[in-house]
Image: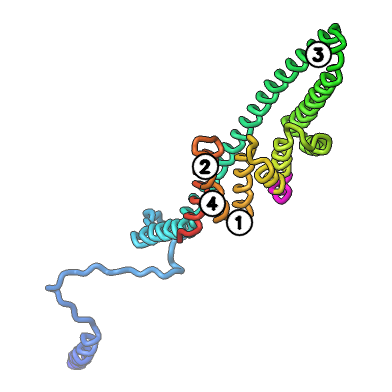
């Protein structure tokens, strides 16, 4: 009995000695603290294979602002490019060219009008000459029945008839050359006018033939020979109906050759000497064109 009691006491003592060590290893918990949720971390290897759907991601405001800024920069660059193209100068050049074309058109219309007037004047003159020739032939027929005194005058009448025939041939030759010119057959018209001048150096249309030769040379871009023909009209036929037109053409040629000052003086002279003429009106148009060119070249 004593032995059992001793064994039990020894076991209790050993248990009491080992208890503090066991209690020291146990964690101390504050029962007054609220329980905290435990965060669970999942490693990549433990991520489930099924993807979890997510909400769409919107672009940040900063990126949108950059896009608008970029577009504005591009617009500014395009605007600068347009300004650098020098559009005002191009518009001015186009306006100047338009004015020149208008002036050239007016000159061409005037030339056509002058040509038509020349043809009408020619046909009126031709009708008068034919009528005079018919009357002359009738008088010659009547005079053939007169006495010997009147018959002695036949040579004189014959000479007059020959003169009229020459004048009629003169007119026909000139008209043929003019017809070729109106048909724009410039080479043939040039040869025809040259033949007229050779055959009728003192004809009624010598001044006109020189003038139209000058026009033909202008069509052929031969300003030198054109100026020579117009100078012939101006210097040798000052009373010709073509002298004003010849002076106008000379002024235009000088302007095209770069003799602007001389051209202005010639155009101004036409305006002063013949202010009511059509040539003066055309001279005024050319002066305005030259002034526009000067202002365009001097404007910075």
Q: Which residue is mark 3?
A: 137
Q: Which residue is mark 1?
A: 258
Q: CA distance from mark 1 to mark 2?
A: 24 Å
Q: Residues within 10 Å of mark 1 (few under 14, many from 20)?
A: few
- N-term mark: 1 or 2: 1
Residue at image position (85%, 8%) is 147
Give percent across and percent down for residue 249.
63, 44
Q: CA distance from mark 1 to mark 4?
A: 13 Å
- N-term mark: 3 or 4: 3
Q: Residue furthest left?
A: 32
Query: What are the residue bounds of the magenta stretch?
Result: 220-227
Give percent across and percent down for residue 211.
69, 39
Given contact means CB atoms under 8 Å apart, are the residues at marks 1 and 3 in contact?
no
Q: Which of the labelled discs sits on residue 265, or is there none?
A: 4
Q: Residues within 10 Å of mark 4 (few under 14, many from 20)?
A: few
Q: CA distance from mark 2 to mark 4?
A: 12 Å
Q: Nearer the viewer, mark 2 or mark 4?
A: 2
Q: Is residue 51 visible?
A: no
Image position of 19 with respect to 233: above or below: below
Q: CA distance from mark 1 to mark 3?
A: 57 Å
Q: Residues within 10 Å of mark 2 (few under 14, many from 20)?
A: few
Q: CA distance from mark 2 to mark 3?
A: 44 Å
Q: Secondary structure at mark 1?
A: loop
Q: Nearer the viewer, mark 1 or mark 4?
A: 4
Q: Residue furthest top?
A: 145
Q: Which residue is mark 2?
A: 273
Q: Secondary structure at mark 4?
A: helix
Q: Nearer the viewer, mark 1 or mark 2?
A: 2
Q: Which of the labelled discs sits on residue 89, or is there none?
A: none
């Amino acid at each position: 009995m004593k032995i059992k009691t001793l064994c039990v006491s020894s076991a209790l003592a050993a248990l009491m000695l080992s208890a503090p060590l066991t209690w020291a290893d146990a964690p101390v918990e504050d029962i007054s603290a609220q329980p905290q949720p435990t965060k669970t971390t999942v490693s990549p290897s433990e991520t489930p294979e099924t993807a979890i759907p997510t909400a769409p991601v919107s672009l940040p405001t900063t990126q949108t602002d950059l896009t608008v800024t970029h577009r504005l920069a591009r617009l500014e660059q395009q605007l600068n490019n347009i300004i650098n193209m020098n559009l005002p100068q191009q518009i001015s050049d186009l306006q100047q060219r338009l004015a020149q074309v208008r002036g050239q058109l007016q000159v061409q219309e005037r030339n056509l009008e002058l040509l038509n007037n020349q043809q009408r004047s020619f046909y009126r003159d031709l009708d008068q000459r034919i009528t005079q020739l018919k009357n002359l032939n009738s008088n010659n027929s009547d005079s053939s029945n007169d006495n010997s005194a009147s018959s002695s005058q036949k040579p004189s009448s014959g000479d007059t008839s020959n003169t009229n025939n020459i004048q009629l041939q003169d007119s026909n030759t000139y008209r043929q050359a003019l017809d070729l010119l109106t048909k724009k057959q410039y080479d043939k018209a040039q040869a025809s006018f040259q033949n007229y001048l050779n055959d009728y150096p003192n004809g009624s249309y010598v001044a006109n033939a020189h003038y139209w030769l000058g026009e033909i040379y202008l069509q052929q871009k031969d300003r030198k020979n054109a100026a020579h023909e117009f100078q012939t009209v101006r210097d040798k036929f000052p009373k010709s109906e073509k002298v004003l037109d010849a002076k106008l053409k000379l002024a235009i040629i000088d302007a095209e050759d770069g003799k602007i000052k001389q051209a202005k003086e010639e155009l101004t002279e036409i305006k002063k000497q013949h202010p009511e003429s059509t040539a003066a009106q055309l001279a005024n148009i050319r002066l305005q064109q030259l002034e526009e060119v000067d202002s365009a070249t001097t404007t910075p």
